Image (spheres, helix red, strand yellow):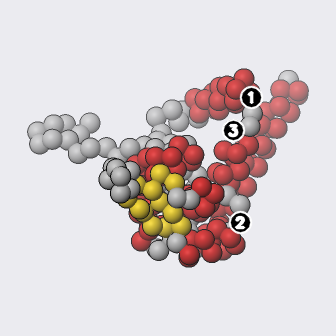
Amino acid sequence: MAKKALVVSGIIDNIRRVFKVVNEQSKKAERETGITGPQLWAIKVIGDSSPVRVSDLASRMHLHPATVVGILDRLESRGLVKRIRSKDDRRVVKVQLTDDGKNIVTNAPQVAQGLLVAGLEVLPIKRLHEISSSLEELVHILGAQELPAQLMLSTEVNLPKRKKPAQGESQC
């Protein structure tokens, strides 16, 4: 039984470490840049491949396009990014950093979400399935299966916005 307790303690300690690094990096990012972790992550990804289509940005961040649009709205209102509509196809929108956005990227700390995605993307698929299965089990243990996938230390939820029900429809 003592061996099992050691393994459980190790799991709990590692979860604590993950939360600690995400929390510290997010606070540091906001303190140093004035923007949230998800916003900083977005401008870092944009900076790596600017100009980038909004749909490609969402894919690279592993986020729903509607979530990315919300992040971009806030970045654009702060003058850190600008959207450019394609002259050939008006449906295509690309985003690029402004000079202010480039300045933030140059001096900004690492973002936990970016480190996590980069680290996971290099793992073999078998290992990814093992990690996924283990995390699903932790979610089940916590009874959190129905919770929305909220971005780390943010109020942003990685789901498309729900359409308002038509008149007379239930909101359930």
Judge depth for marks 1 and 2 and give the one in front.
1
Residue 149 is left or right of residue 107, and the answer is left
Quadrant occupied by the N terminus:
top right
Residue at x-position 60% and y-position 61%: 47
Image position of 152 with respect to 172: above or below: below
Does residue 134 appear anywhere in the picture? no
User: Which residue is at the far left?
Assistant: 168
| Residue found farthest to the front | 88
- Give the numbered dot on residue 124: 1
Q: Secondary structure at mark 3?
A: helix
The residue lying toward the viewer, choosing from 73 and 29, is 73
Q: Which mark is residue 109?
A: 2
What is the CA distance from the residue labelled 1 to the residue labelled 3? Answer: 8 Å
Q: Which mark is residue 121?
A: 3
Q: Amino acid at mark 1?
A: Pro
At label 2, which amino acid type do we have? Pro
Residue 120 visible from this viewpoint: yes
Cα–Cα gap, marks 1 and 2: 28 Å
**Callout 1: SS:** loop
Q: Quadrant of residue 87?
A: bottom left
Indicate left or right for 168 with 93 as reference: left
In front: 98, or 44?
98
Q: Amino acid at mark 3?
A: Glu
